Image (cartoon, helix red, strand yellow):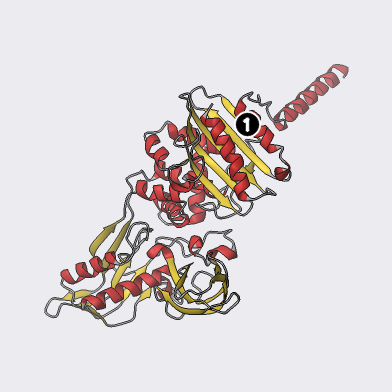
Amino acid sequence: MRIQAVYLFTIALFIQSFAQAQDTPPVRKVPGTAVQKLAKEISGYQSLKHSAFSFYVKNMGSGNAVADINSEMSIPSASTMKLVTTATATQVLGRGYRWKTRLAYSGEIDSASNTLNGDLYIIGGGDPTLGSRHYNREGHERDFLTTWADTIAAYGIDSINGRVIADASIYHYDGVPSGWPWGDIGNYYGAGPSGLTIFDNMCRLHFETGEQSGDSTMLLCITPHIPGLRVQNYVTSANSSKDNAYVYGAPYSKDWFVRGSIPKNKDDFQVKASIPDPEYIAAIELDYALEQKGVHVAYAPTTYRELSKNIPFKRPETTEIYVHRSPTLASVMKFVNQKSINLFAEHILCQISVKRSGYGSTSNGALVCMNYWKNKIDASGLFMTDGSGLSRSNAVSAHFLVDLLVFMSNTKSADGFKESLALAGKRGTMSGIGRGTAAEGRVFGKSGTMTRMKSYAGYVDTKNGKRLAYAMIINNYNCSTSQVTKYFKALMVKMANY
């Protein structure tokens, strides 16, 4: 009995020791570098007393850590989440991938009268660049619509005894990703993805302002025209040069209100907002382009979503007229990583979902991304809700971002991925940081900025010929964002001199 008791006690002790070992984090060797020393100093600043700070730098040549401050801590990182989206898309879709939008018709064409006895369809493929200001000079955003109308007329259609129907059903009709703040979704940077996006899903509110600060303003018009939209205008004139007006309105809603202030003494001050129903605007715009071409359309334009409201709608068999192909994914990625275009990032995420599951969905795209990296690196620190980083329910660790960057540096897309990033002192959202320092032209990265949140992640080509991957994230600081940027600039200079 005593031998048995000793045996059981030994087993119990072993189990307890094993459990404690599983719960105890591994001892991390703290680097003794100048980068680590500065990061440690910054983490102790009074302005960061209540902050979460995750920082990690790795020498990609030796594989050794150069700096490590809470590198496993997962916190929201704003737009550096776009690195996860674009890296996944590079691997899943390929840099040469192009979105496709199809023009097709149902019914038959009467060759005697050149009349289409049926409906004309715009079948969206998720292209985010149709009429985009990023790809078209001002005044040329509708050129693609003219091309479409010319193509339809050249096909032998002079009139349509039916409707223009826009079909954006390749993406779910969620409007915007889960977790986006109410204060963002009515504004241009909060435009959600659509299976048929047009004009960056952005409209412009044209205001005439008063002579004195505090005067009321007059809303002159909205371009493009959005039929039935009702806007309550609470915007005042201000002695300022800044646009401090915010638009509040839900996807598919026709009720908006606008608050804030804009500069006084302006005849036409423009405030950018998100289009509530891009699919409908696409139908209206093509219908108008056809009328301008002389192709008469008998009935008012409509959408797949509208036709599906009361009874399930299934698109009938159609005949294809034309396929419009977007610029490459590589091209779109440059706008995402250098200019931080939220809409493009969300479209990339939805297209990852299309590729893997046959339909576009933000939540499914995020799940695909998390599962993809789980099989490549330690992705336990990745929590993904959207593709752009606008949702505060996203979270990621500096360690994960560095591991992702190192992984990408060993793929055939390594050079292209690196060149898609902003560059300190040179281009993109990092063009204003590090000018005249060792960081200029050496620190590549994706920046992220939201209220009380700042981050950078990318690569460094040091003055001494070393190649580093880094990520730095700070949440909830008690100083200005510009001050946190100065802290990060100091770290970038130190890394460039490493």
Between 284 and 340, the one lying in front of the other is: 340
Q: Is residue 231 above or below residue 409?
A: below
**Is 464 situated left or right of 158 in this image?**
right
Q: Is residue 130 above or below residue 352?
A: below
- Quarter residue 48 falls in: top right
Between 430 and 17, the one lying in front of the other is: 430
Between 393 and 469, the one lying in front of the other is: 469
| Position in image of residue 261 (x %, y %) | 57, 71
Residue 378 in view in this figure: no
Residue 487 in view in this figure: yes
Q: Kindly identify which residue carries mark 1.
A: 68
Q: Residues within 10 Å of mark 1 (few under 14, many from 20)?
A: many
Residue shown at 48% from the left, 74% from the top: 266
- Quarter residue 168 falls in: bottom left
| Position in image of residue 197 (x %, y %) | 39, 63
- Residue placed furthest toward the bottom: 298
- Element under disc 1: strand
**Is 165 situated left or right of 6 in this image?**
left
